[in-house]
């Protein structure tokens, strides 16, 4: 089978086209495996759709299905544009969380995110106030002065207690710094789009930032998030790393 590998600022994905929906959990585990497979944080299957450019199946590296992935949405929009599945620099596709509209300008891709749900703004854990926000998938968000240290054991406990991804973040020098422990990868990843958007939302709702903001995930890359006419927009560069024929998987 032919696959394409993409990186959305260090959050990496295996992408391929199929004609029918199926349970591909095992395939996702195999393809995403860093030693025996291609290696990725997630797998995206592009499927035909009667109304939109396409529909996707998104799998985490452990084979679990997730409704949305911000970085993969930008990577797959670029993929669909290159393959001629979408036209005129716009990709509209159906995810488990709803329809995503992405605009492609060279390697810079902006996704209009689905409307978020703020589930809880007063979760008390270890002396801190966490918010639970669904920005397509659930994210716990805490604001800290120092995010140099990420307590992975704490993140792992909270991830399981709330069935959510876990983010620590701070806004400093007009940059929103974010680190994310991802469900389904079960570790910190180099970037998480829905996580960055959830952190933006908390800061925005608390009146700590507005307009277009530079965001920096663990990878050190530069992305931008804005809130315009009721829509959270998430943009940055994507990298097509390689295309390959995968054997014996
Ligand atoms: N990396 C993604 C989020 C992928 C899904 C997440 N791990 C979950 O299971 O909730 C992003 O860029 O948003």
Image (spheres, rainbow, N blue to C red):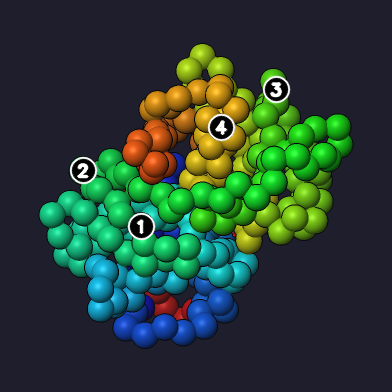
Q: Evaluate whether residue 235 shows in this view.
A: no
Label 3 environment density (alpha carbons within 10 Å; few <14, some 14–19, many ≥20): few
Q: Which residue is mark 2?
A: 105
The residue singled out by tag 3 in the image is 146
Q: Circle 3 — which element?
A: loop
Q: Position of residue 11 (x, y in %)?
A: 49, 49
In the image, farthest residue toward the right: 126
The residue indicated by pointer 1 is 100
Residue 159's place in the image compared with 85, above or below, is: above
Q: How far apart in space, not on screen, are marks 4 and 3 (Cα)?
A: 21 Å
Please tell me which residue is depicted at 59% across the width and 35% down the height of the picture. Answer: 202
Mark 4 or 3, nearer chain start: 3
Viewer-side label of 4, 2 = 4
Q: Position of residue 25 (x, y in %)?
A: 56, 77
Depth check: give the residue in front, 84 or 172. 172
- Beta carbon at label 4 within 8 Å of ligand 1: no
Which quadrant of the frame does ligand 1 lie within? Answer: bottom right
Q: Which tag is nearer the camera, tag 2 or tag 1?
A: 1
């Amino acid at each position: 089978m032919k696959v394409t590998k993409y990186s959305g600022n260090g959050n990496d994905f295996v992408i391929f086209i199929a004609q029918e929906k199926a349970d591909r959990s095992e395939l996702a585990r195999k393809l995403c495996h860093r030693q025996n497979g291609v290696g990725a944080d997630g797998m995206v299957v592009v499927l035909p759709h009667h109304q939109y450019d396409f529909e996707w199946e998104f799998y985490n590296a452990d084979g679990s299905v997730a409704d949305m992935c911000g970085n993969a949405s930008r990577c797959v929009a670029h993929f669909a544009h290159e393959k001629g599945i979408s036209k005129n620099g716009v990709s509209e596709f159906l995810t488990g969380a709803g329809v995503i509209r992405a605009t492609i300008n060279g390697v810079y891709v902006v996704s209009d995110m689905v409307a978020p749900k703020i589930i809880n703004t007063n979760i008390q854990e270890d002396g801190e106030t966490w918010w639970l926000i669904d920005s397509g998938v659930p994210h716990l968000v805490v604001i800290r002065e120092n995010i140099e240290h990420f307590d992975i054991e704490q993140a792992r406990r909270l991830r399981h207690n709330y069935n959510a991804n876990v983010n620590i973040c701070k806004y400093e020098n007009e940059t929103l710094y974010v680190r994310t422990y991802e469900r389904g990868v079960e570790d910190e990843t180099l970037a998480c789009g829905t996580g960055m958007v959830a952190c933006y939302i908390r800061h925005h709702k608390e009146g700590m930032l507005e307009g277009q903001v530079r965001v920096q995930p663990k990878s050190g890359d530069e992305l931008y998030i804005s809130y315009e006419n009721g829509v959270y927009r998430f943009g940055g560069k994507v990298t097509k790393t390689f295309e390959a024929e995968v054997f014996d998987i």
